[in-house]
Image (cartoon, grey):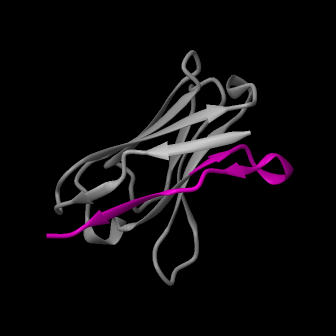
């Protein structure tokens, strides 16, 4: 099992980034997926969730209306489109498979929002 995130970087406030997560080694279409983030000195928090079919999504209040999670079950990919980025969105972003005993995380990608 492997999850590989990409797309992070440095962006100015108000800018956009698109994170990608490639999944390997498991039947991707059977698992709910989510994005979590952890800022320096803070607890990890869930940002966005998408069910296995891609028919249902959920977002943290702090990103609702700015971030969009999506997935492509043919390509075993999950994405996070981040618009109107703010300095408080600065964190390491992690792709997560499933929940509980089936949970698995990637290595993370750094997103820094700064002028």
- Relative image position of residue 79 (x, y in whole percent): 45, 37
- Front-most of residues 110 and 64: 110
At which x and y percent is residue 84? 22, 53
Q: Say which of 17 and 86 sits in front.
A: 17
Segment tinted magenta in the rendering: 95-115
Residue displayed at 58% across by 55% down: 107
Residue 51 painted magenta: no
Q: Give the left or right position of residue 101, taking residue 30 as reference.
A: right
Instruction: Locate the C terminus and report the quarter of the image it occupies.
Output: bottom left
Q: Position of residue 72 (x, y in %)?
A: 52, 22
The correct choice, above or below, for 42 with respect to 59 in the image is below
Left or right: 31, with 84 as reference point: right
Provide residue 12's location: percent of width, then percent of height.
16, 61
Residue name at image x 72 percent, y 43 percent: 98
31 or 64, which is in the foreground? 31
Residue shown at the point (62%, 40%) measured from the top left: 33
Q: Is residue 46 above or below residue 74?
A: below
């Amino acid at each position: 099992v492997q999850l590989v995130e990409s797309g992070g970087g440095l962006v100015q406030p108000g800018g956009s980034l698109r994170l990608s997560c490639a999944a390997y080694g498991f039947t991707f279409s059977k698992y709910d997926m989510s994005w979590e983030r952890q800022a320096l000195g803070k607890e990890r928090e869930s940002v966005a969730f998408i069910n296995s079919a891609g028919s249902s999504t959920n977002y943290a209040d702090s990103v609702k209306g700015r971030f969009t999670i999506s997935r492509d079950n043919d390509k075993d990919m999950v994405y996070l489109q981040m618009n109107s980025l703010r300095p408080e969105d600065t964190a390491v972003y992690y792709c997560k498979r499933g929940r509980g005993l089936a949970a698995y995380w990637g290595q993370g990608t750094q997103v820094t929002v700064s002028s």
